[in-house]
Amino acid sequence: MKHRDEGFTLVELMTVVLILGVLVMIAVPAFVNSRRAAAETACLANRAVVSKADFSYYLQSGTWSPGIASLVGSWIKSTPTCPESGVYTWIDEPTAEQPLRTLGCSVHYFPVKSLTPLGSTFSEISRGMIERMLAYYAKNGRWPSSRPPASYTDLGLTAADWAKAVEHLNYTPGGTKVSVTPEKGYVITVVDVKGKTRTLKAGEQDIFYDAKTAKWYYKEVNKGNVVDIATIQVQPAKK
Ligand SMILES: [Zn+2]
């Protein structure tokens, strides 16, 4: 019976289609991933080239280039573009000590800038100040100055960096304490040692860490005023 050899059976065709489908399912994501990785690598290489060219420009002229376009010709062949249409911007301010700038890409490299030299969150900032206060004591045998701006300087900080509230909180180190007050229009709420919620208003009340007892308090150092600092919240003041 020659008849059977004239074509594929339905089952055979379906098997072929199924196998092709599986192959596509495996190959497409792998292809997309490798393309993405290639674009990322190309973008990184672009940015490294521009950073180096910018640095060379600085070394030769003593000033920073006004933009990437001004590097083209003398330092780089053409304006580099991100393979995935990212926008390039400098993400750090150059200084005489550190003139090598870092180029960021809106698609591939956009690190979030920290709000202060100690970090951005309450726990990062308060921990940073406390650690510096303890380090100062360990080194000098006395506590830092009790008043700003010297109290900041003693901790290796710049008072001007702390003139404005950070996420609605003001931080003031002084002597054995790190004091935190809410910005005008905001309140701090925190649960005290007895489980009662304390609300602290701007301009009049603070919570503070006391290095001698290694605890957080509201109002003053007193057993009843110890607070559970993990419960701290900042809210807009009710009108
Ligand atoms: Zn990019």
Image: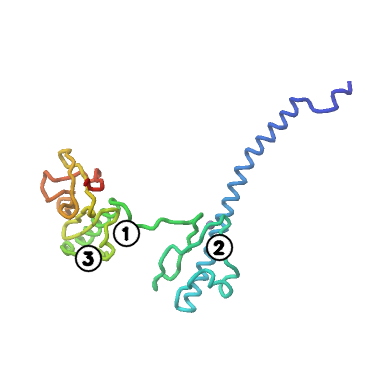
Disc 2: which residue: 46
Q: Residue at x 23, y 66 (%)?
A: 153
Disc 1: which residue: 116
- What separation in Å lies between label 3 and label 2 (alpha carbons)? 42 Å
- What separation in Å lies between label 1 and label 2 (alpha carbons)? 30 Å
On the image, the x and y values in percent for residue 161 come to 29, 63
Q: In what element is the residue under mark 2? A: helix
- What separation in Å lies between label 3 and label 1 (alpha carbons)? 17 Å
On the image, the x and y values in percent for residue 152 come to 23, 64
On the image, the x and y values in percent for residue 158 come to 27, 66
- Answer with mark 3 or mark 1, whichever residue precedes in sequence: 1
In this image, 229 relative to 12: left or right?
left
On the image, the x and y values in percent for residue 50 come to 53, 67
Res. 154 mark? 3
Instruction: Identify the residue at the far right of this view.
Output: 2
User: Mark 1 is on which residue type?
Assistant: Thr
Instruction: Count residues near mark 2 (Cα–Cα under 10 Å), then give few for <14, some for 14-19, many for 20+.
Output: some
- Answer with mark 3 or mark 2, whichever residue precedes in sequence: 2
